[in-house]
Image: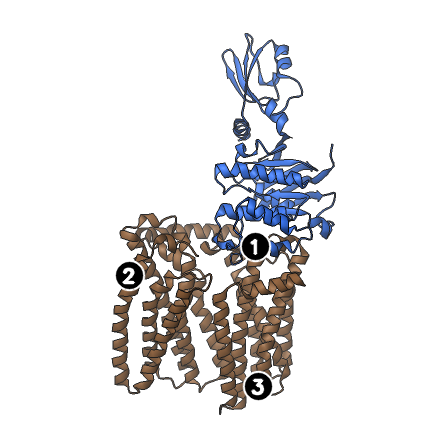
Chain colours: A brown, B blue
Amino acid sequence: MQQVNRTMLLMLTHSWVSLIIIGFLFVFFIFAQAGLALGPAPEERVFRAVIMINLVMSTFLGVYFAGAQLSLKQFYLWKVNPRFRTTLMLAFLILVGSSTLLITIAFAFNINQRWLFLILPFCASIFAAQLVLETTLVKRTLAVIIPIGISQLQWLEIHEAFYLIPIFMIAMFYIRRMYSPSYFRQTGYMDIMSINKAQLTNSKPKIIIAANHYLGEFVSRWILKSKAVIDWAITMPHSKLALITSIWLFTLIPFFLIVGGGKPELLESFVFMFTASVSISMAMESRLQFFQLKSFAHIFSGQNHRELKNKILRSVDKTILVNCLVLLVGSMALAYLLDEKLDYYLLFSISMMIISVSLVFSPVLLCLTWIKVTFSQVSVLVLYGASLFAIAKLMAHFQEQLGHSVIIFVVIAFAFICRQLTQRVFWVKPLEQLLRNV
Amino acid sequence: MNSPIISIKDLSKSYEGSEVLKGLNWEIEQGDIVALLGKNGAGKSTLLETIMKLRDADKGSLEIWGNSWETLNQQQKEKIGFVAQDIKGYEWMSVTNFLNYLGGFFPSFDKAYCEQLQSRWGLSAKKRVGDLSGGQSQILHVIQALSIKPELLILDEPVAHLDPSMRRQFLAELIELSCEINSTVVFSSHIVSDLERVASKVALLLDGNIDYYYDLEDLKSSVAHVKLTSNSPISHKDFPPLINWQKRQDGATAKIATPLKESIQSMANKVGAQVETMPMSLEDWYLEVSHAAS
């Protein structure tokens, strides 16, 4: 039991940054739930919104603890020692179980005695964990899609047991599967760098290898010519960075399908929240890939590797822009389809300002390390949050469209000036420090 | 002769149609310090990881202390220490946390001995695992494996990331410590000079098989460059154990790559040839047998 306790402590504290963010989200969601319960919204709608909030929270927890388990599983004992496996699994299940229990305690007051729904947060954590732990991208996607698909049975107006019990049974199947010694995904440089057959597909290896080879040859003439290889090394169009927005959109769609129309402010706040966090997640992920530049950093010119650093900034900016725009356009399309009475101009203008602020902060965020919490990290994040808060306050202060247009212009112009400064911070940061993750 | 601690019969392993281990047979005896040599990609890691059951063999059998992995009991498994070549994970832990945490899974973990090893090899207790250099990571994992006082210690390229001065010293100390705790050690390497002072036996993995497996001292005293001179023609068939046979006008040159049952002199006497031998280093031996195999 002592080993289980130790493992739990290690899993809980393996990433202080994520833990703090989850802590904030936890408090935020609890208040959001309470606010919904006390508000004037119809009971059924509150019920669905509360479920969705709890599922999002459980998803974060599942991914967080699975990340720790994945790291601990890298030791060879996972494959040969049942005691090691049992300890890791017990620690994971106790953590997920107790944290989702905390969620369900708050949740229990809002579910109108539909007790079966209490198992949902736990199941959601288990499914989310598979996003980290599953061995191939196809299996990771299936682990999320299958339960969502089954949950759609609710629209048939059947008793909830008909879809909740199968969902619970699938979660049990995954727990059993997680215990298997062969359920093992290696982490490492190759895992980050290459789109290998095991990650992508279960197709015949030879076909994939041949296809990769020919596609790679075809694409390389432009990549190598333009030194766009940075895009591949830092922002990796084929990796999870490009998937982040899709996953968010993917969570938005079922959310609004369940909650239903008539809640434009919810859609707006989701878009703002996600847009604001895109730059942080992009910077965090990209920063961790910097070591991949080691082999070709020397081919770029300029003092202090200026050319290379500019290429990095452009790559990250491009990724942030693409992701934010996909999110914005996707959300607008969703609002249009759901016939939401959304102020498209307001949504667009606020998003543009958030993107501008993100681009101001992205060079500084890229200078930070994301393995442990540091004072500079917290300071930058607080400053970033305060800037976004200031924009929200400004927009609320000037209600008419003309006022908004002026604010947008001022904010974007000011952001442009600030960006010149933050860019310099990135330029002067020694490459040596950027190539290390600590 | 000691009883075999590891016994491998007819072991095969393929990756995507390429056969890495081809019906390999090998026995390692109690108390041996075995250096496993082989080129890059020869299958050393595959073999060691298959012994550790981290990879499944396609066919063949493998026994440790007379048991397959399936019948090996938990206590026996906990007496095996292993250091993998690719060391990953645990980046956020401190060195002490890492060692104590993993030590908790081995009943024979000796914390005091572990601390002693840390100070011996200058590993800072408070340093984060993710901050260690490649060489320091290897030392950390070796400390972890030694601290459980294993009866069988398997090390996959344990000194590959260390500089030459540190490498030889560290390997010698590691083997000395293993002997103190009566471990049987199998370690892989492709740096021949590393093993000369530390191994008791040498195994060479060539083309998916252990083609050469000898006592290091026997091997060192046997291997040689050979120059044969004769007035009458001589053939390789008269000297079957020799390798890299090269015909010359007045005879031939060749290499002795294994301890011989019949002396080279007596073979030469049969065909009326004269023999001149020159000592050969293990490094040269390795190159010659690799060349002969290819």
- Distance of mark 2 from mark 3, alpha carbons? 51 Å
Q: Position of residue A281 (x, y in %)?
A: 42, 66
Q: Residue at x 27, y 52 (%)?
A: A303
- In the displayed structure, B208 sits above or below A397; it is above
- Distance of mark 2 from mark 1, alpha carbons? 39 Å
Residue A110 marker? 3
- Pointer 1: residues within 10 angstroms few (<14), some, or many (20+)? many
Circle 3: element type = loop
Observer able to see residue A105? yes
Residue B96 marker? 1
- Pointer 3: residues within 10 angstroms few (<14), some, or many (20+)? many
Q: Quadrant of residue A140?
A: bottom right
Q: Are marks 3 and 1 on the same chain?
A: no
Q: Quadrant of residue A232?
A: bottom left
Q: Residue at x 57, y 82 (%)?
A: A106
Tag 2 residue: A424
